[in-house]
Image: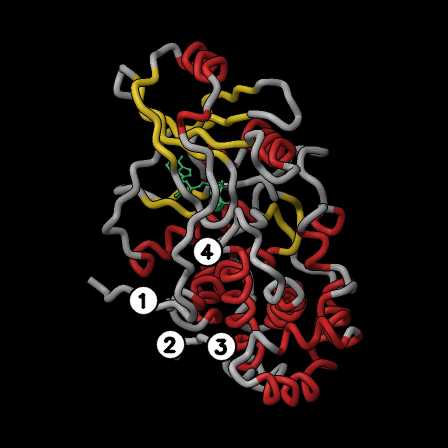
Amino acid sequence: MTPVPLPFFDPPAAREAKPSFDLLPPEMRQKIEARLSGEIISGEVVYGSLSSSAGYVLTFDSGLKVFAKGSHPDEMSHGTLHIRQEIRAYEYVPVLKETSPRLYSWVSDNNEDGWTLGLWSFIAQDDSADFAQRVSGVMALVAQVHGAAVPEGIVPDARAHNYIGAFLADEKKWRRIEAEASIRAKFLNLFEDPAAAQAWLGRNIAALIALQADAAVRVFTQGLIHGDLRTDNILFDKDRSWLVDWPNACMGPRTFDLVMLFTHLESTGFGAAENFLPLYDAAAGTRFATSEIDEIATMAGSMAGYFADQAYRGVPEKLPRLRWMQKSLLCAQLQLLARLGRIESPPRFSGQRDI
Ligand SMILES: Nc1ncnc2c1ncn2[C@@H]1O[C@H](COP(=O)(O)OP(=O)(O)OP(=O)(O)O)[C@@H](O)[C@H]1O
Ligand SMILES: [Mg+2]
């Protein structure tokens, strides 16, 4: 067994505010039971990484286990939109039938601010699964998604996507940190020594802005992208790996997924992000590790700008781990850019562990 890797930053102890199973209205429970022809004998809350969406493992009288996830009335806005987008992807993007758990059905109270739940086959996670041993299977899945055909009009283009678009536009992000002194001060406070960070930023902000500007115009290698590819959205059962959590699926830069996943791996202690590029290239037939490395740098620069302009903000009450995740990804993306020779090595963030 490989030792458990240590992250850059320890996660906050608090978890997301998710509705308990008791809060599921009886009508919703009945709809689920009718749809799956059985009686629910128990339901337990399941946590993901960040969101306050409803998530349950439901056990039926037949022994069937189902993963139910979606919106609920106590959530921040857009919950219903997200689950509807995800269900649409599961229904109409053929590759998800191979890469992801089966969507059995979905149920709704037909209220835009109410309950809508997707119902998926339950993946019994193999707790002994080791990412290092599963990595080639994961790369094959990601490459399969990126190369998949998608029917017209099912998923948006990344640049027009309400969330992903912000990562690619040359707006705010590093430009905001440069232009607005009060924002910059908050950003610099993320570091152990804000004065050292200020000096570092002064020497590197032009390069960071140039990367962000390039992301807005560059013709990236495209594909169907997941849009939130972190390790918590990859499940391992004893036989294989699965990709879950698809509300952000869109047509866009493959490097969006690659930079996100590989810097997430780096931030959680799995080694340098770029070490994963040859493994993806081998699965996908691309050359991101070599001749197309600029695509990686551009994406890392622009994505880091997004997280730099988020990570300093207040912690939303229902989402205690959001800023921690953003800071972790930002830290790994800056280190990646330094190793790629695009910026100077960043100073330490406060609370950063040497890994
Ligand atoms: N089919 C499944 N079977 C078993 N567990 C699952 C299944 N799908 C998801 N999970 C577990 O539930 C968690 C939350 O699911 P998912 O990521 O889809 O939801 P989410 O509410 O969008 O959460 P977040 O945004 O917080 O990651 C996953 O991280 C995973 O641990
Ligand atoms: Mg998730």
In primary-sequence order, the first of circles 4 and 2 is 4
140 relative to 2 in the view: left or right = right
- Pointers 3 and 2 in contact (CB under 8 A)? no
User: Residue under circle 3?
Assistant: 350
Label 3 secondary element: loop
Q: Nearer the viewer, residue 146 or 345?
A: 345
Give the residue type at disc 3: Ser
Mark 1 is surrounded, within 10 Å at the Cα level, by few (under 14), some (14 to 19) or many (20 or more) other residues, namely: some
Q: How far apart are the alpha carbons under marks 1 and 4?
A: 25 Å
The circle drawn on residue 355 is 2
In primary-sequence order, the first of circles 3 and 4 is 4
Q: Residue 222: x, y in percent?
A: 65, 53
In primary-sequence order, the first of circles 1 and 2 is 1
User: Residue under circle 1?
Assistant: 5
186 relative to 350 in the view: left or right = right
Label 2 secondary element: loop
User: Residue under circle 4?
Assistant: 283
Q: How far apart are the alpha carbons under marks 3 and 2?
A: 14 Å
Give the residue type at disc 1: Pro
Residue in the image at 66% along x and 26% along y = 112
Query: Between tags 1 and 3, which lies in front?
Result: 3
Label 4 secondary element: helix
**Quadrant of residue 173 in the image?**
bottom right
- Pointers 1 and 3 in contact (CB under 8 A)? no
Q: How far apart are the alpha carbons under marks 1 and 3?
A: 20 Å
The circle drawn on residue 26 is none
- Pointers 1 and 2 in contact (CB under 8 A)? yes
In primary-sequence order, the first of circles 1 and 3 is 1
